[in-house]
Amino acid sequence: MTLEDRLADALGPFQTERKRMFGGTCFMLNGNMLMGTFRGGLMARVAKTDHAKVLKLPGAREMVMKDRVMEGFILVDADSVAEDRDLKLWIDLALAYNATLQPKASKPRQGTKAKRV
């Protein structure tokens, strides 16, 4: 089973939306990025205040885009989430942060028109 499939199964009770992003698949919850796959591993969104603390967890490293550290975004090696309990830890961290965010309305996909009511 792929990491994306495992995430989909684990996030089944939540109303997530999948989006292609960063060359992988991101799971959105309440219109906010929750977590996803990235370069064969896991990308999890956590509180910026927890950034340094979670970097000490096995397999965790900073997400860097265009030479800039993306605070609150953590990359995790696939081997470090091979066990369900390890994946659950990251899911729980991402869900905890997501719960602090204001919900966002889903944006219509590009190329489609919003329906008028």
Image (tube, rainbow, N blue to C red):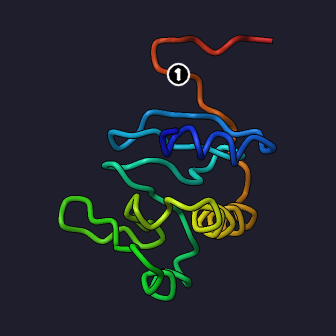
Above-or-below relation of 53 to 24:
below
Above-or-below relation of 71 to 5:
below
Residue 7 horizontal side relative to residue 60, left or right? right
Where residue 51 sits: x, y (%)? 48, 80
Where residue 6 sits: x, y (%)? 59, 44
Res 12 → quadrant: top right
Residue corresponding to mark 1: 109
Res 75 → quadrant: bottom left
Residue 88 horizontal side relative to residue 45, left or right? right
Where residue 53 sits: x, y (%)? 50, 88
How dense is the environment of label 1, judged by Cα within 10 Å: few (below 14), some, or many (20 and up)? few
Question: Secondary structure beneath disc 1?
Answer: loop
Count every numbered label the image shows and give the total: 1
Q: In which quadrant will I find the C terminus?
A: top right
Above-or-below relation of 26 to 75:
above
Closer to the camera in the image, 10 or 35: 10
Residue depicted at x 48% and y 40% = 2
Residue depicted at x 46% and y 39% = 25
Residue 68 horizontal side relative to residue 60, left or right? left
Closer to the camera in the image, 6 or 21: 6
Residue depicted at x 50% and y 62% = 81
Q: Amino acid at mark 1?
A: Arg
Residue depicted at x 57% and y 34% = 18
| Residue farthest left in this picture | 67
Above-or-below relation of 91 to 31:
below
Where residue 35 sits: x, y (%)? 54, 53
Residue 96 horizontal side relative to residue 110, left or right? right
